[in-house]
Image (cartoon, rainbow, N blue to C red):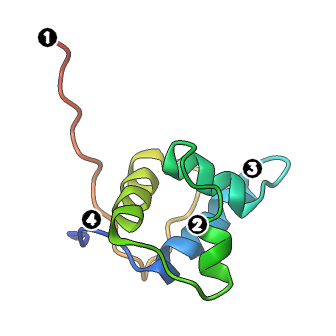
């Protein structure tokens, strides 16, 4: 895998969110994906991006990390979107 930026672009994250939403059975809304990505703090991020609005860099970084860490091996990550390995988790002491 290639090194990924600190965060993906809004357009890249929106594409990934749509893949996640459509992969669920039954499919879910972008607002549900937004809740998952934000830990329940923001339920409108992806619907806002879809309407052409922006978001802050903290939201982009959090969404990028969530996508990398929670991407299912059954979903196809688009070849034109950079992907990195998830951060290793600290071992419990």
Q: Secondary structure at mark 1?
A: loop
Comparing marks 4 and 2, which lies closer to the viewer?
2
Q: CA distance from mark 1 to mark 3?
A: 35 Å
Residue 47 coordinates in the image, percent (x, y): 68, 72
Does residue 24 appear left or right of residue 7 in this picture?
right
Mark 1 or 2: in front is: 2
Q: Nearer the viewer, mark 3 or mark 4?
A: 3
Q: Gap between marks 1 and 2, in whole Å?
A: 35 Å
Mark-to-mark CA distance, 4 and 2: 27 Å
Which dot, 1 or 3, sits closer to the camera?
1
Residue placed under numbered mark 4 in the picture:
1
Residue 21 pos. (x, y %): 70, 58
The structure residue drawn at horizontal position 25% and vertical position 70%, both measured from the top left corner, is: 4
Identify which residue, 62 or 26, lies in the foreground.
Answer: 62
Check contact, mark 1 vs mark 3: CB within 8 A.
no
Disc number for residue 93: 1
State the residue position of label 3.
24
Image quadrant where residue 30 sits: bottom right
Please state which of residues 26 and 45 is positioned toward the viewer in this rendering. 45
Q: Is residue 86 left or right of residue 55?
A: left
Kindly report the distance in space between the C-alpha atoms of the residues bearing marks 3 and 2. Answer: 19 Å
Q: Which residue is mark 2?
A: 45
Identity of the residue drawn at 47% across and 46% down: 70
Q: Secondary structure at mark 2?
A: helix
Determine the CA span between mark 1 and mark 4: 30 Å
State yes or no: discs 3 and 4 in contact (Cβ < 8 Å). Answer: no
Mark 4 or 2, nearer chain start: 4
Marks 1 and 2 close (CB-CB < 8 Å): no
Do the numbered discs 4 and 2 sit on residues whose CB atoms are within 8 Å?
no
Q: Residues within 10 Å of mark 2 (few under 14, many from 20)?
A: many
């Amino acid at each position: 895998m290639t090194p990924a930026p600190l965060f993906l672009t809004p357009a890249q994250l929106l594409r990934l969110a749509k893949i996640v939403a459509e992969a669920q059975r039954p499919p879910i809304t972008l607002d549900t994906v937004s809740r998952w990505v934000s830990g329940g703090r923001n339920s409108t991020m992806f619907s806002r991006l879809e309407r052409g609005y922006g978001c802050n860099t903290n939201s982009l970084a959090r969404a990028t990390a969530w996508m990398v860490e929670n991407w299912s091996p059954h979903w196809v990550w688009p070849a034109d979107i950079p992907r990195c390995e998830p951060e290793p988790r600290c071992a419990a002491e």
